[in-house]
Amino acid sequence: MDLSIITINYNLAKEIKECVDSVIDKLSGLEYEIIIVDNNSVEKESLGLSAEFQKEKYKNLQYYYLDKNVGFGKGCNFGAQKAKGNVLCFLNPDTLIKQNIFPELIAKLKENKSIGMAGPCVTENNKLFDYSAGFFPNIFYELLNVFFVGRYFEAFTIKGKAKQNKAINVDWVMGAALFIKTDVFNKVGGFDKDYFLYFEEVDLCYKVIKSGYEIIYLPYVSVFHHGSLTVKKDYSFFTKMFYKSKLIFIKKRYPVFKKNIIQSLMLIQIFSQLFLWTALLPLNKNKSLGKIKGLSSLITMLFKNVAALRD
């Protein structure tokens, strides 16, 4: 089988139906399967999807409903265990395939044994920034993040490297649309179970590169991505999870000296963010309150981790 598309759903019944329909329209000529893993969605609409997907149109689709929310990485691992394709595509439910990206990405993985993973552009057209790929966390970018510009500088650098009709080597590609050879995915042990949300794809990319494979980004093929639909429902939780997962990555993959510096910079970043969202409170009360709550809980957690590493 050419391709297994794995999508993890959580409370996005409408979006995942649209996503699947857009995918099926582009898979003519490929031997494929679509695997949907529902992470115990609380919205009743999700329960009806399994029946909806029994129609003839969805004959190549498998639907699994888990009895608890195991997170993105574990959900993907569950789907990968059911997969039969030579290439795995992990695709967010809030994406739409408007351009036929599949032949190009599959071909890139097949034509070069050294390439283990590839990703398309998953951001809207932006003349200055590209957030679809990037580099592993480092002291330089973390220092820039103290002043809220590190991620922008990284995205600006990627945009500068991206040339028309040319793939580029990167450290990571966004998990919203990630293509990986099945044998490579199995070789590195899939997604790390310690991540519930965020940085699981960065960690996977790290393991792929450490195993001797290249990761390429194809800026000339694109996926439409609504982006962060679930995040907007709980800013506190998702803010906390982002920094917590980043901390897990740093602790797992970096030597002690580098850990100490980056964690200290992260703590400064969180205080800076706390100040920023407090100032923005009159302009966006709901988002600001959520951010402030999440950042406040992170301060205690990071103080404990920095202190533990210095013991």
Image (spheres, rainbow, N blue to C red):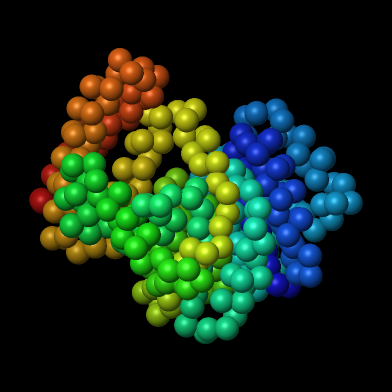
* Quadrant occupied by the N terminus: bottom right
Tell me if residue 70 can be seen. no
In the picture shown, does residue 167 fall above or below 291? below
The mark tally for this picture is 0
Find the residue positioned furthest to the right. Answer: 56
Q: Quadrant of residue 132?
A: bottom left
Q: Nearer the viewer, residue 15 or 60?
A: 15
In the picture shown, does residue 5 fall above or below 286? below
Q: Residue at x 47, y 34 (%)?
A: 231
Tell me if residue 140 can be seen. yes
Find the residue positioned furthest to the top. Answer: 282
* Left or right side of 108 for 308: left
Give x and y (percent) for residue 47.
73, 34
Give x and y (percent) for residue 110.
60, 80
Q: Residue at x 29, y 18 (%)?
A: 281
* Left or right side of 22 for 165: left
* Left or right side of 177 for 247: left
Q: Residue at x 75, y 69 (%)?
A: 30
Give x and y (percent) for residue 244.
32, 43
In the picture shown, does residue 237 fall above or below 92? above
Give x and y (percent) for residue 191.
48, 59
Q: Residue at x 41, y 36 (%)?
A: 238
